[in-house]
Amino acid sequence: MDYRSDRGYRAGPMTSRAFLVDSHAGQIRCMAYLMAIGWGTPHVVTISDGSGPVTERDLLEFKAVATFVAEQVAPQGRRFNALVWRKFYVEKFIGAVSPEALSRREFAAFLLQVRSHAASELGVVFPLWE
């Protein structure tokens, strides 16, 4: 017997979600998400304590943030592409260090600085990802 049949499993696209559980608030966010999704859609949930190297998913999120900045910000009427914004934020917040060289915890803190600066200083509006 298939274990999924008695849990209301429906075929559908797989949803992936990652949580950095390094605090009580992170644990609560993760548990709230797990309780909210129920058994209706298959999910992959990754829970991390923040140790280990930066993943491709982390770097893709940084690219997405830089793309939102590039689409919404035009300093002095000039537009810059996402690559320029990524370089700007690396130099502004971590200097000569490559984002790939950071731990996941350090990268999460870096990305929070980037998103905070973009929203508060540049007026960038991000979709609700979390």
Image (spheres, helix red, strand yellow):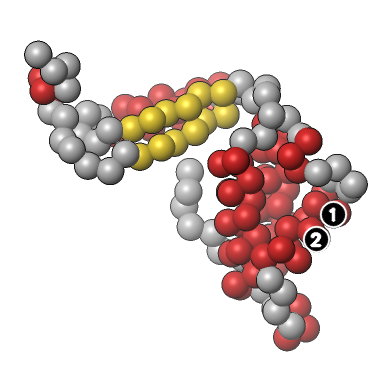
* Secondary element type, mark 1: helix
Q: As shown in the figure, which amino acid type bears the numbered disc 1? A: Lys
Q: Residue at x 74, y 83 (%)?
A: 78
- What distance separates the C-alpha of mark 2 from that of mark 1? 6 Å
- Residues packed near mark 2 inside 10 Å, few (<14), some (14 to 19) or many (20 plus): some
Q: Residue at x 13, y 18 (%)?
A: 2
Q: Which quadrant of the structure image shows residue 21?
A: top right
Indicate whether 8 appears above or below 41.
above
Q: Which quadrant of the structure image shows residue 99?
A: top right
Q: As shown in the figure, which amino acid type bears the numbered disc 2? A: Phe
Percent across and percent down for residue 8 are 13, 28
Name the residue that disc number 2 marks.
88
Name the residue that disc number 1 marks.
92
Which residue ends up furthest to the top in the rendered image? 1
The N terminus sits in image quarter: top left
Percent across and percent down for residue 90 are 80, 52
* Secondary element type, mark 2: helix
Residue 80 horizontal side relative to residue 34, left or right: right
Percent across and percent down for residue 47 are 51, 24
Q: Which quadrant of the structure image shows residue 53?
A: top right
Indicate whether 124 appears above or below 77.
above
Badge 2 vs badge 1, beta-carbon distance below 8 Å: yes
